[in-house]
Image: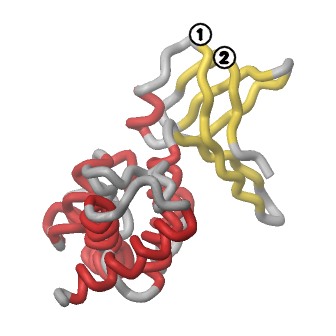
């Protein structure tokens, strides 16, 4: 399926952009913040997600993998569809959304246009800890993402898992073979988070 579209931005609207690529002009629905990050008549790469139903087909686009991941996580919340997710992402910045979810700030989420109390509560329950990226050594493109995902799958918080992996890495010989290093990192991270 489509992962991204690279081309020339030919027009920008309130809810979408038009991107010309190989003699095809695509209409791509995007959050307002992402639309503003693009310049007319400039080359760009837009990460995409295709919505396909019996009666309609729409392409949604995002300025970064982080933004697309946020959209996909929002779709997992009961009562939020693609249009709703785009509206939420248009009404709050990425950093503010992550901070509100991490801090359990229901009032900030309710202030997002079109987001009611019940849906905001569902977002808090479903997404707390899932959007935050560690600001330390473990970045989104880290080779240790698989370890972090495994720890999250065991019920640990994503941010704490990333921090634990970073802490464990400090005490491990960097010259070790990668498989042995990952095994040790995983074990040490669990020990670190259990407080042993």
Residue drawn at point x = 49 percent, y = 16 percent:
39
Residue drawn at point x = 38 percent, y = 46 percent:
90
Left or right: 48 in relation to 168: right
Which of pointers 1 and 2 lies earlier in the amino acid sequence? Answer: 2
Quadrant including the C terminus:
bottom left
Q: Viewer-proximal residue, 151 or 13?
A: 151
Where does the image place residue 184, in percent across and percent down from the top left?
42, 74
Q: Which mark is residue 117?
A: none
Where does the image place residue 99, in percent across and percent down from the top left?
20, 58
Left or right: 31 in relation to 169: right
Residue lying at the far top in this picture: please name it. Answer: 41
Q: Is residue 191 visible?
A: yes
How packed mark 1 is, by other alpha carbons closer than 10 Å (few <14, some 14-19, many 20 or more), is few
Picture layout, residue 64 above or below residue 21: below
Q: Which residue is mark 2?
A: 8
Location of residue 53 by image quarter: bottom right
Q: Which mark is residue 41?
A: 1
Q: Count how many numbered circles sit on residues in the image.
A: 2
Q: What is the CA distance from the residue labelled 1 to the residue labelled 2?
A: 6 Å
Picture layout, residue 4 above or below residue 177: above
Q: Viewer-proximal residue, 65 or 149?
A: 149
Location of residue 133 by image quarter: bottom left
Residue drawn at point x = 22 percent, y = 67 percent:
102
Q: Are marks 1 and 2 in contact (CB under 8 Å)?
A: yes
Q: What coloring was used for the rendering?
A: secondary structure
Q: Secondary structure at mark 1?
A: loop
Q: Secondary structure at mark 2?
A: strand
Q: Viewer-proximal residue, 76 or 54?
A: 76
Q: Is residue 116 visible?
A: no
How packed mark 2 is, by other alpha carbons closer than 10 Å (few <14, some 14-19, many 20 or more), is some
């Amino acid at each position: 399926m489509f992962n991204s579209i690279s081309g020339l931005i030919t027009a920008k609207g309130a809810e979408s952009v038009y991107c010309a690529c190989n003699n095809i002009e695509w209409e791509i629905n995007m959050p307002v913040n992402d639309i503003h990050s693009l310049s007319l008549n400039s080359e760009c790469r837009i990460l995409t997600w295709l919505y396909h139903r019996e009666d309609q087909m729409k392409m949604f686009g995002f300025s970064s993998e982080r933004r697309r991941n946020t959209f996909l996580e929002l779709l997992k919340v009961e009562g939020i569809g693609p249009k709703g997710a785009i509206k939420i992402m248009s009404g709050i910045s990425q950093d503010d959304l992550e901070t509100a979810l991490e801090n359990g700030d229901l009032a900030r989420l309710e202030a997002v246009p079109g987001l009611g109390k019940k849906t905001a509560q569902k977002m808090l329950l479903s997404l707390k800890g899932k959007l935050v990226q560690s600001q330390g050594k473990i970045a989104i493109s880290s080779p240790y993402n698989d370890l972090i995902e495994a720890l999250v799958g065991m019920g640990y918080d994503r941010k704490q898992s990333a921090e634990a992996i970073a802490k464990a890495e400090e005490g491990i010989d960097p010259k070790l073979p990668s498989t042995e290093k990952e095994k040790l990192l995983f074990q040490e991270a669990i020990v670190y988070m259990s407080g042993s």
